[in-house]
Amino acid sequence: QVQLVESGGGSVQAGGSLRISCITSGRTMNNNPMAWFRRAPGKERELVAIFAPSDGSTWYANFVKGRCAISRDKAKNALYLQMNSLNPEDTAVYYCAAKSRPDVEWDYWGEGTQVTVSP
């Protein structure tokens, strides 16, 4: 059973930074695509960033491009999202997700970590 556990969320003022983490357990996910999603109050869940282990490539949504960096630490079974220049519109629950295989939808999810950005 794969488990994803996020941490590192919190409250920060606009312009600040946070790094959120996702630790995987149950089986190694070092060769599986992983991503960060977020859901803001009253909005649909949206994809924030993807890490592709096949070549280490990354993808970012336009609304975080240039402000965030997704990374992975294989030794710690961890996925990170460094977020800089945060603004109130970034307030959301951030979720870690993984794919059991590259050709399926995101089928492993964490419980989420709350990020709140005040003006």
Image: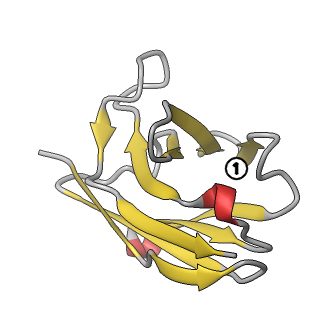
Residue at 66% x, 64% y: name it.
88
For this orientation, the residue located farthest to the front is 119
- For mark 1, give the secondary structure: loop
- Would you identify the image quadrant in which residue 7 lies? bottom left
Image-based side of 37 in relation to 88, left or right: left
For this orientation, the residue located farthest to the right is 66
Q: Is residue 30 visible?
A: yes
Instruction: Assign the C terminus to one quadrant of the image.
Output: bottom right
Q: Is residue 78 visible?
A: no
- Disc count in the image? 1
Q: Position of residue 68 (x, y in %)?
A: 74, 63
Q: Position of residue 73 (x, y in %)?
A: 52, 70
Image-based side of 45 in relation to 81, left or right: left
Q: Position of residue 82 (x, y in %)?
A: 66, 71
Residue at 29% x, 38% y: name it.
108
- Would you identify the image quadrant in which residue 55 lies? top right
| Vertical order, 57 against 18 (above or below) | above
| Vertical order, 86 against 101 (above or below) | below
Q: What residue is disc 1 on?
A: 56
Residue at 30% x, 43% y: name it.
109
